[in-house]
Amino acid sequence: MSSKVILITGGTSGLGLAAARECLTKGHTVVITGRNEASLKKASKQILKNLDLTNKLYTILLDLNNLQSVREAAEQFKALKLPLNVLINNAGLTTPTLEFSSDCERVEKTIFVNAISPLYFTHLLFPLFDKTSRGRIIWISSSLHDPKISGGRVSALSAMPETVDFDNLDGHIVWDSMLFYKLSKLGNVWISNILNEQLLLSEDNNNVSTIAICPGFVPTTALSRNSPWILQMGLRYVLSLMSFTTSEAQAAADYEYYATTPDLEAVSGKFLKKRELSEGSEESKDLTKAKRFWDLACEITGIPKNAKWTN
């Protein structure tokens, strides 16, 4: 398997960091993003521990809560003059209270950071995909976007609805931290599906694919950092021992698989879990709603609706 250039957003902690180290040890060149220099420096030390691969790891500043930072991050990657092979949109968050980005109040912060802003980053990077090989865009979603999946119900408000209320994406009617995390993960699947439609329409593109994946339930990630300390302890030291959970090591290996396996070269616009095709929710397959969400994301970020996805 040939070496690839893999860009991982949110590579300073959790699955992003673990995946960066896994990809590096498999011989790939890795670029990680982080919100500040201190976290990038710390993560680089962890990733490179006992590895003599300093020249294979690069870092970029990226704050998905700020569109100017997204633009600057794309320019930073361009300056590296590396041929992009794989983009893993991994960075994500939850918030303890209803919050907004300074750039947008049409959707609340979780949806903006986890789904809207990554589309903008992807759009800016798309022309930089290597034209001589197959490229791949991976959206880290979650099975929790499916109402049939019972997990992640912290309260009655956390339940994923059968039908998304587009008028409440700003949380002004009802808001719950876990609910909006689930909505953002549905947004990832929707965006991947419509991006696939856009790529199929492009006469100039036939070498980049897009997939959304569920890494499994990994209790040790940093997503719970805003949760009460007792919940964080339970996730890390109790639930992490349960058979239905996924370890960071396994999830990192799965990231590397999704990024590099030739088995997925003909797969695009699909949702995957445990290295297999998965159905996803009924609503995730509704391309009309997916296009509505896509159009909203384009309006917020300034991506032209008729933008050409060519590299």
Image (cartoon, rainbow, N blue to C red):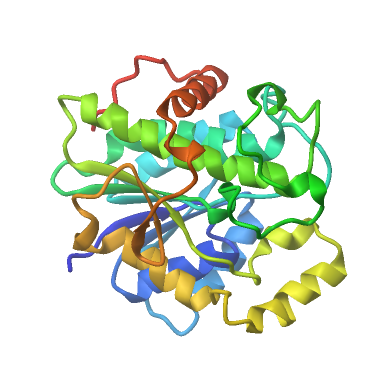
Q: Please, is residue 267 above or below residue 242 in the view?
A: above
- Name the one closer to the observer, 83 or 267: 267
**Residue 160, percent from left and from top:** 66, 44
Number of residue marks = 0
Does any portion of residue 75 appear in the rendered image?
A: no
Residue at (50%, 18%) from the top-left corner? 302
| Foreground residue among 264 and 132 | 264
Residue 50, position in %: x, y? Answer: 46, 85
Residue at x 38% of width, y 61% of height: 30
Which is nearer the eye, 268 or 10? 268
Instruction: Give x and y (percent) for residue 241.
Output: 64, 84
| The C terminus lies in quadrant | top left
Q: Is residue 224 above or below residue 80?
A: below
238 vs 308: above or below: below
Residue 28: horizontal and vertical position, in percent? 30, 66
Taking the image as shown, residue 183 lies to the left or right of residue 138, namely: right
- Residue 275 seen: yes
Specify the quadrant that holds the N terminus.
bottom left
Q: Is residue 117 left or right of residue 254?
A: right
Q: Decide which of 69, 205 is in the foreground and name it.
A: 205
111 on left or right of 178: left
Q: Quadrant of residue 56?
A: bottom left
Which of the 4 quarters of the picture holds residue 123?
A: top left
Q: Is residue 14 above or below residue 281?
A: below
Please give the name of the residue rendered at 67% of the width and 40% of the height, measured from the top-left corner: 110
